Image: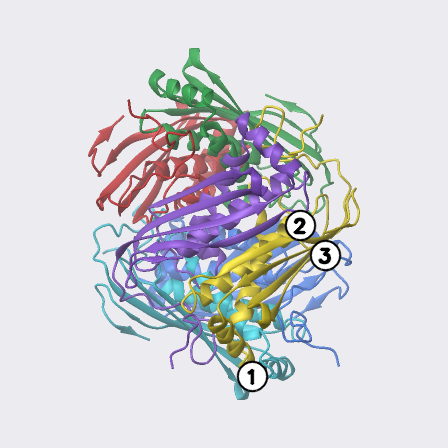
Chain colours: A green, B red, C purple, D yellow, E blue, F cyan
Amino acid sequence: MSNPLSHINAAGEANMVDVSDKQVTQRSAIAEGYIYMSAAALSAVIEQTNAKGDVLATARIAGIQAAKQTSQLIPLCHPLALTKVSVDFAIEAEQSRIRIEALCKLAGKTGVEMEALTACSVAALTLFDMCKAADPAMRIDGIRVLSKEGGKTGHWQA
Amino acid sequence: MSNPLSHINAAGEANMVDVSDKQVTQRSAIAEGYIYMSAAALSAVIEQTNAKGDVLATARIAGIQAAKQTSQLIPLCHPLALTKVSVDFAIEAEQSRIRIEALCKLAGKTGVEMEALTACSVAALTLFDMCKAADPAMRIDGIRVLSKEGGKTGHWQA
Amino acid sequence: MSNPLSHINAAGEANMVDVSDKQVTQRSAIAEGYIYMSAAALSAVIEQTNAKGDVLATARIAGIQAAKQTSQLIPLCHPLALTKVSVDFAIEAEQSRIRIEALCKLAGKTGVEMEALTACSVAALTLFDMCKAADPAMRIDGIRVLSKEGGKTGHWQA
Amino acid sequence: MSNPLSHINAAGEANMVDVSDKQVTQRSAIAEGYIYMSAAALSAVIEQTNAKGDVLATARIAGIQAAKQTSQLIPLCHPLALTKVSVDFAIEAEQSRIRIEALCKLAGKTGVEMEALTACSVAALTLFDMCKAADPAMRIDGIRVLSKEGGKTGHWQA
Amino acid sequence: MSNPLSHINAAGEANMVDVSDKQVTQRSAIAEGYIYMSAAALSAVIEQTNAKGDVLATARIAGIQAAKQTSQLIPLCHPLALTKVSVDFAIEAEQSRIRIEALCKLAGKTGVEMEALTACSVAALTLFDMCKAADPAMRIDGIRVLSKEGGKTGHWQA
Amino acid sequence: MSNPLSHINAAGEANMVDVSDKQVTQRSAIAEGYIYMSAAALSAVIEQTNAKGDVLATARIAGIQAAKQTSQLIPLCHPLALTKVSVDFAIEAEQSRIRIEALCKLAGKTGVEMEALTACSVAALTLFDMCKAADPAMRIDGIRVLSKEGGKTGHWQA
């Protein structure tokens, strides 16, 4: 039976998968995540956002920058020349949370879901950093891949 | 009323808080997080871990390295000379998840909870990367601060 | 006569100045710079800024992040744990330019003017990047130190 | 009317332009910049350079290294696998300045003028760092693109 | 006669070689290196490794990560999108040393021997760091290229 | 008996040593290393160096920059604010080699020998990169600590 952990070889050693012979195809991935915070903290974000403050812009830039650094953060990720990164936010006041969605694209040999997940995670951490004086008990939740396209497996949807 | 978002100034602009006049004190923070995966993926991790493969070691190193890069990832974080970082894992098979706990310490002017949260997040992303061939539908959840010590506010517990 | 280039030793070799025995004092530096652009490009920035778009926020974050990376960019700079960085913009429509001002602070052994200059430069480059489709002939000008405080030389003003 | 700021979307949000469908073509860009300094500081540089000291070599290496880090410094720049970077200096004693010229090349989907501008800026900052003991009032000026080749727009000259 | 130092131009200036017109071919390189240590230190590594501790895993991850950062460490190296990196260890107790072997692969325009050498060097440094309390007099030796494939020169063997 | 590998805990896990309670003292370390090359390659370096080309300057800058990045390269190293780094070369033609010596200094809680070793290694790799067209069979050898000062152990000499 084949090893289900593709990055670990038969000897149990960490292993950067060889993608030398894979085809260059158009690839994309969408990931999402949430940060839950108190009503007071969320009100402060909403007020800032209505006043067009930099809260969401700062988190968006942090997420985009992080996507480009994924291979430096995650040891077995390949360095990739991303052709597109975007990070979007939706304030969902009833659930006391902010939703984060990240899209990454690439013409390359391996998928970009780790880049999209990294963008979501770092955007969430940046929101945490800016709101932690208002609510130190926030929680980052539900970081996952929504869909991916390209490569041998083609379309995948959560 | 004072602005509850300390990193945003009166004009709504992102702002690295001035800690020049804060005291240097011993500080520490503990954060946790979880990655949920299918029984099959978790079995693969358990089998690898029992066989002493590199799965958890790889995620641990990634988390420690990320803690040291926090100020490059999160725009308004101060650069800090961490004196201690550790990352620990507990496989919780009944809940189909792996628990991650990170501890950071510093003798400095500002808290280290963002560093602990970043360590947890990147350790979780690294586990995701290694297990995604076995289960692309994993979910990173419950990233939060458990406790922090030091500074003007002293002890805080979730 | 002593060598006026402090980073070059008697043999002409590049040299990171030894600050081991210098006192830790409160230090700060303010730098400024300008980017000149066509009326059309500046109008687009003004319109975006009035509509509270992310143009200036993006350049501000880039400048703050760059200040923290100064010692990685400039070979003979010491790594410094900045305690404060801010970047501000003023749109000066009559002169067809945007003014950038950066402030850095540190309790440390060496000055922070290179950090403030780096923040200005990278903020200007980021504005260039965002406006280059509107005007590829922009010019970054007048990057210099306005004032610095702290250390043996005390107050210095341009 | 289309938005003249290509990196800002209709909602005013920062946006990494999607280059997935652009052609890979040979691209190059040349940028220039100047650093003005006192006669005394410039004399020190000339003397060092005549004595074949490391002043210009240090600034050259810093500029080349910075070109390769452009996408980490400028938030909306794509990561690019540059095929050539060079940085040249001309000491222009009559104008009390050093001229910097940077060339970048790439076979890729997007232009390299930001890389050339970044190389010029960081080379200038490095000269500033090495000469600041001799003249703290230096000024970096005239950073701009001289020409670019490749892509849909073809040849552009300042 | 042509200059045998390809990265230095006719004026003696450091120079990133222009690979714009080179063919994209499959390339690979294998490098090796050794760290010599006292019998006591090597015993500790062996004991740890038998107990499946993280010693070799930590050095392996450090080597893989370093390969991906080669162009940021070595000024005239081109940024490369490596398709494969692996790092292996052999404990050679009779010679009181650990052997390190690194393999890098790329479909690209320039060779990857610097990446393989960097992986070996940083893996060796990481072993040094972990063992230095047991033996501060260790020695890293014999870092060299064993073989390379691809490009105009084709196969090369040490 | 205590574990001789200080970075590995009782469970065999990689571990960043806690230096929170250590004293801040003046620390320094000197490391050396060698690169051996063919007579032809060494002649090219000598000729370049006599002509005051950038060969050694480039390697020196690379070594200095690498010392500052040590904690990003070596997973369990603490981030340190080095107060001094220098890298020197001696061409030893009779032994067909170049000797590299690096000095690092710090007022801090932990030693700087890893920083000095990293500076030597990356300076050697940079020389390798520049000379590899002249001699692909070079060998980096004898990287070790010569002496260190400061901290609880005081003076140590190889």
Under mark 2, the amino acid is Glu
Q: What element carries label 3?
A: loop
Residue at 51% from the left image edge and 77% from the top image edge: D48
Residue F9 at x, y percent in the picture: 31, 48
Q: Position of residue F130 (x, y in %)?
A: 61, 70
Left or right placement of residue A113 versus residue F9 in this view: right
Q: How crowded is mark 2: few (under 14 residues within 10 Å), some or many (20 or more)?
A: many
Residue type marked 1: Ser
On the image, numbered disc 3 is attached to which residue?
A: E109
What residue appears at the point 36 percent right and 43 percent down from the top-left corner? Answer: B78
Q: Which dot marks residue F96?
A: 1
User: To which chain does the residue with label 3 belong?
Assistant: E
In this image, C131 relative to B28: left or right? right
Q: In the image, residue A21 lies at what x, y percent?
A: 72, 45
Q: What residue type is labelled 3?
A: Lys
Of tags 3 and 1, the one toward the viewer is 3
Q: In this view, does A90 lie above or below A114?
A: above
Q: Distance between the residues labelled 3 and 1?
A: 31 Å
Report the residue marked by disc 2: D113
Count of numbered circles in the view: 3
**Residue E144 or E115: which is nearer the viewer?**
E115
Relative to F111, does residue F93 appear above or below in the rendering? below
Q: In this view, does C36 lie above or below D61?
A: above
Identify the residue at horizontal 30%, vertical 35% (top origin).
B30
